[in-house]
Amino acid sequence: MKNLILYVVTVLIWGSTWLAIEFQLGVVSPEVSLVYRFAMAALMMWGYCLYKKLPMRFNLVQHGFFILLALCNFGFNYLLLYWAQQYLTSALASVAFSTMLLINIINTRIFFGKPIAKRIYSGALLGIAGIVVLFWQDLQVLDLSNLVLVGLLLALSGTLVASFGNMVSVRNSRRSVGILQGNAWGMLYGTSALAITALFTGAEFTFDPSLPYVASLLYLAVFGTVIAFACYFVMLKNIGPEKASYVIVLFPLVAVVLSTLFEGFVWNGYTLAGFSLVLAGNAIVLTPFERIGRLLGKRPAVIPEPV
């Protein structure tokens, strides 16, 4: 029941953050908006950890992994995704991000020796086919002026970086590093890295006092960062990255619904087919063959594959 609650909370929050990010783009540069977001999140995380008197001292090796966590989960992954959403709707960006399901499973195999079930290959092909169909109209004109393709490449790059961060989080949990402490240090280092990046790129530290910007910033810092990451990393620890990634199946649906309602996202044959293929591929990746057999009323004829 605890993991189910964590799952539902994560899906609803992260499914809605894609729309919230849209209100961050415009007046303030993405780099600076991210500095504000993670600075607020870091202050809240540190305040909570100190209030609870959690141990915050770690050796240099652990701090090295905190920095890796920061760069991958609280820094450059979001910078790439914010850049991507300058060219993509929140719906398309969230679907591109759903490829992390497959990337997490492959990385779990590489870094932790987790076997890859055969069904994953067919699910991966469906997922890739879905992305191709989804962006088919833009893929037909492959050139650097195609901004949607630029957004897709940025979103996929951010997804890959985020998956590496997931692996770091799993490693930290296996070394008995507290999730809250790891997040607090990670968000602090992430804020520093983003601030350095903003200064290096010449971004101006402006602020937008409008209600949409401030409200979305608060939502992204409190819910999208502090609460959602805590829930997700607890699931990573409890059930592993390949199963915790199940959230990625549903939050694109939340994002698409919100994008349709508030951004005027228009469905057509390509988007419907693309979304269907991506979700079908994710479902196959996450559902063992023997479970599919039970759903179809058949008994499996082979030895069950590893999940």
Image (cartoon, rainbow, N blue to C red):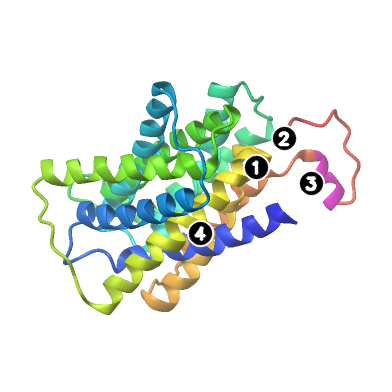
293 inside magenta stretch: yes
Real-space CA distance between mark 3 and mark 1, rounded to the nearest whole angstrom: 16 Å
Lower sequence index among marks 1 and 2: 1
Callout 1: SS: helix
Q: Earlier in the sequence, mark 3 or mark 2?
A: 3
Q: Position of residue 178 (x, y in %)?
A: 55, 38
Question: Looking at the image, which residue is at 59% across and 31% down?
Answer: 176
In this picture, which residue range is highlighted in magenta? 290-295
Q: Which residue is mark 3?
A: 292
| Residue 39 position (above or below residue 110) | below
Which image quarter is the C terminus in? top right
- Residue 191 bears which disc, if any? none
Q: Residue at x 27, y 65 (%)?
A: 24
Image quadrant where one finds the N terminus: bottom right
What is the three-letter code of the residue carrying label 1? Lys
Are dots 1 and 4 in contact, CB under 8 Å?
A: no
Residue 53 location (% of width, % of height): 51, 46
Callout 3: SS? helix
Q: Residue under circle 2?
A: 307
